[in-house]
Image (cartoon, rainbow, N blue to C red):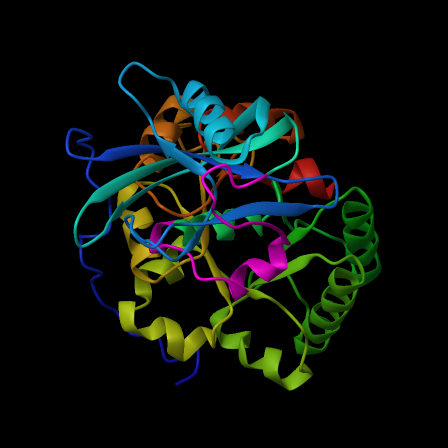
Amino acid sequence: MSMCELILSIVPNILIKPNSMTDITRVAVAVIVNKAQQVCISLRHKDVHQGGLWEFPGGKIEQGESIEQALVREIKEEINLDILASRPLISITHQYADKKVCLHVNKILEYRGAAIGVEGQAVKWVSVSELSNYNFPAANISIIKSLQLPSKYLITGQFTDTDDYVNKLKKALANGIKLVQLRLKQDSCKDNKQLGLLLTQTSLLCKESDAKLMLNIPVENIDLVNLYEIDFDGYHLDSKTLKSLSENSTQDHFDGKLLSASCHNAEELRLAIGLNADFVVLSPVKKTVSHPEMTAMGWQAFSNLIQTVNIPVYALGGVTERDIETAYKYGAQGVSAISAFWN
């Protein structure tokens, strides 16, 4: 089945985790990255919940403790590191067969000491790319996805011709962009020849800069991807395409590649999760010139919506690189933008 053979369906409304926290075990989790860009993981003892699996260190948040206080205590007790500074990374609620947990995950910005297994557990430092070689509890999978994604997500914008497009993309990549969405509408290209040139040029430039490439191109042109045999990492769905896809079509259409989607409300977030999206963008956080008719949701509403989502979420709409720290504070993976990163 090709991308052109989309089928309308309704994705079950069972994909958002509950808001009630009364029956959930709250856990503070630390993602600790050293100067060599390796992540600290430890092996759970076989006689505990999810025993025999690797995990990111952390532990249960005690009554009256903040996430940060629990992290400092647990990491010192488990691997003898002193946590000096951290920031929110992602929050994940997961239902196991025997218990429900909420993982409050922080990325450690500064620490002191050398990691050792205080309780006799094995401790390792591994690269992010190696994490898939280890068996983790199911609730940890979204942490790995978050670690594999940068804080900035570029959406390509307008251009006058192919040379203008290439120059803008080169500049963005030189400025540190590591995740690119090639966004082309039906009127973006003169013909299939130009589209093919844009596909090959974008693929080559992203590969040279070690940046991930997501394709957001008209459905009727998607077969050209195979024609030009380009390297890319995944597909991005606009909200219209998202609504038209069936839950069971993901594997047929996307061949194991990454999947991201544009969302504007809770229902679209449900649809994206139902299609096993790896991450999403949620907009508009602020008022935008490109879509003046849309009401900005603001940071608090953005935060309220993503509290129910277990995958990384980028803030989109009127945001710039200056908003990244604010985005972290409200639970986002980072920010996504066109003009702020493209022009």
Task: Give the residue at x 78% y 57%.
Answer: 209
Seen in the picture, residue 213 relative to 17 is either above or below; the reply is below
The total of numbered circles placed on residues is 0
In the rendered view, would you say 129 is above or below 229? above
Q: Nearer the viewer, residue 161 or 41?
A: 41
Compared across the picture, whether 101 is left or right of 322 comes to left
Image quadrant holding the N terminus, namely bottom left
Residue that protrudes farthest toward the top in the picture: 64
Image quadrant containing the C terminus: top right
Quarter assignment of residue 282: top left
Most foreground residue, 207 or 21? 21
Does the stretch in magenta take in 136?
yes
Would residue 261 be counted in the magenta stretch?
A: no
Q: Position of residue 125 (x, y in %)?
A: 63, 49
- At horizontal 68% and vertical 71% (from top left) the residue drawn is 195
Q: Which residues are magenta?
A: 116-139
Q: Is residue 164 left or right of residue 151?
A: right
Asked whether residue 287 is in view, the answer is no
Residue at horizontal 39 percent and vertical 53 percent from the top: 239
Residue 22 in the image: x percent, y percent? 15, 29
Q: Is residue 7 visible?
A: yes
Farthest residue in the front direction? 120
Residue 289 relative to residue 332: left or right: right
Q: Nearer the viewer, residue 114 or 228?
A: 114
Query: Is residue 203 positioned above or below 59 on the image?
Result: below
Whole-percent x, y for residue 26 in the image: 29, 32
Front residue (pair 323, 129): 129
Residue 308 point in image, percent of width and height: 29, 39
Instruction: Please tell me in which quadrant of the rendered image residue 73 appears.
Output: top left
